[in-house]
Amino acid sequence: MNINLEKKLIRLAKRIQLSYKPNKVIHITFLLYRNKIISTGINDKRKTHPSSSHPYKSIHSEVDAILKLEIPSECKKYHITNIASIAQKVTLVNMRIMSDGTIGLSKPCKHCSRLIEQIGFKEVLYTNIDGGFSNG
Ligand SMILES: [Zn+2]
């Protein structure tokens, strides 16, 4: 991912934080296809049942982004209609914006990592405590 795209995504994530969760930590996932955002996911603690025994007590941003994903129209014209078909061209980018607007570690949890691996995304990037991106 080039530096301009990184800066653009950081600006966008901060705007989402301001409008959606001002002064709160936000975990965001962008799915990129050919450097274009095709889905955006946000963590949400209120979405699943509190006594659920499922590993996800809340909707993680990765799952949210995957559920919201729409196949780009340029793929539909080749009759590509499911996520697995385009996953190898999709980069997943995780970002954590802290309550003070600084960048935090956004490495996927073990459950999301397993899901990401099963889907087979081309690349996974996540913000690190130095304010940059790590992969893998
Ligand atoms: Zn997770």
Image: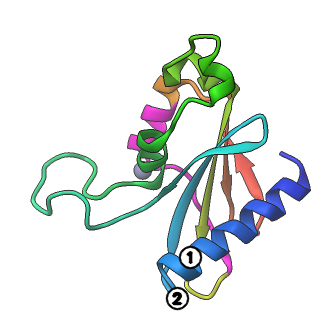
Q: Position of residue 127 (x, y in %)?
A: 68, 59
Q: Secondary structure at mark 1?
A: helix
Q: Secondary structure at mark 2?
A: loop
| Other-residue count near label 2 (Cα within 10 Å), few / some / many at <14 / 14–19 / ≥20 | few
Give the farthest residue toward the right: 3
What residue is shown with label 1?
17
What residue is shown with label 2?
23
**Mark toward the start of the polypeptide (1 vs 2):** 1
Quarter assignment of residue 78: top right
**93 part of magenta stretch:** no
Q: Position of residue 86 (x, y in %)?
A: 61, 22
The structure residue drawn at horizontal position 65% and vertical position 75%, both measured from the top left corner, is 15
Q: Position of residue 131 (x, y in %)?
A: 75, 69
> Where 117 sits versus 65, above or below?
above
> Where 47 sits versus 64, above or below?
below
The amino acid beneath tag 2 is Asn
- Residues at marks 1 and 2 touching, judged by CB atoms closer than 8 Å: no
The structure residue drawn at horizontal position 19% and vertical position 46%, both measured from the top left corner, is 54
The quadrant of the image that shows the C terminus is top right
Q: Who is closer to the viewer here, 68 or 132?
A: 68
The amino acid beneath tag 1 is Gln
Quarter assignment of residue 58: bottom left
The quadrant of the image that shows the N terminus is top right
Residues rendered magenta in the picture = 102-116
